[in-house]
Amino acid sequence: MPDTAPWLVVGLGNPGPEYARHRHNVGFMVADLLADRAGLRFSRHRRVMAEVAEGRLRVGGPRLVLVKPLTYMNLSGGPVAGLAQFYKVPVDQIIAVHDELDVPWTQLRLKQGGGEGGHNGLRSMSSSLGNKDYVRVRFGIGRPPGRQNPADFVLSDFSSVERKELDFFVDRAADAVEMVIDRGLEPTQNQYHGT
């Protein structure tokens, strides 16, 4: 793994203002916060259907490319694979931030590799990369209430109660991404899996 390769942090979501506050777009929310923290601005990539923000987490810190694919969720993999190739990023330096139905609301779970759990964005990434060994920051949104269809649930806004806590948990997810980059996956799992 070359030291010069940046980290590719992919916020998964759907483009467009009508999707901006949906549960399925927490990846975009975390990517936006990371860009704000580092003083970076997103712009359209010249070769790939994605917005990117390039820079460093802090002065002297690791190089970073934040990504928001401009395709819909189920086609996210094409832009991610294109950017991984463009920036020569090894798969173990790719972090996907995404909503997770199987993790309770307010909880984060991190893992490297494994299945996609029915998440179309992850499925597209794994297929396009030809590899599942990227890191996933799984932002718990919990299961839908009652008999609500999971697809309808993820494509709806957070509840008024959830919105009161949302910024705090987006902040925690951004902290977790930074910790993976700075200290590695295992210490980050130890820190966040107990809470």
Image (cartoon, rainbow, N blue to C red):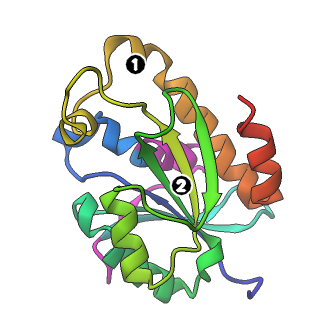
- Residue 128: horizontal and vertical position, in percent? 37, 81
Locate residue 1, reporting x and y percent.
74, 87
Whether residue 40 appears in this view of the structure is yes
Q: Name the side, left or right, on which 139 lies relative to 101.
A: right
Question: Which residue: 54% across, 84% down?
Answer: 87
**Residue 25, located in which quarter of the rendered image?**
top left
SS of the residue under disc 1: helix
Q: Which mark is residue 124?
A: none
- C-alpha span from label 1 to label 2: 25 Å
The disc labelled 1 sits on which kind of residue? Arg
* First-in-chain label (1 vs 2): 2
Pick the front one: 29 or 119: 119
Look at the image and give the residue range highlighted in magenta. Answer: 29-49
34 falls in the magenta region: yes
Q: Which residue is mark 2?
A: 40
Q: Is residue 45 visible?
A: no
Residue 81 picture quarter: bottom left
The C terminus, quarter of image: top right
Asked if residue 118 is among those painted magenta in the image, a careful observer would answer: no
Q: Viewer-proximal residue, 52 or 21?
A: 21
How many C-alpha atoms fall within 10 Å of the one at disc 2: few (<14), some, or many (≥20)?
A: some
Q: Say which residue label 1 marks.
A: 163
Measuring from the top left, give residue 10's x and y in whole percent: 47, 61
Q: Is residue 172 found left or right of 28 in the rendered image?
A: right
Residue 182 location (% of width, % of height):
79, 58
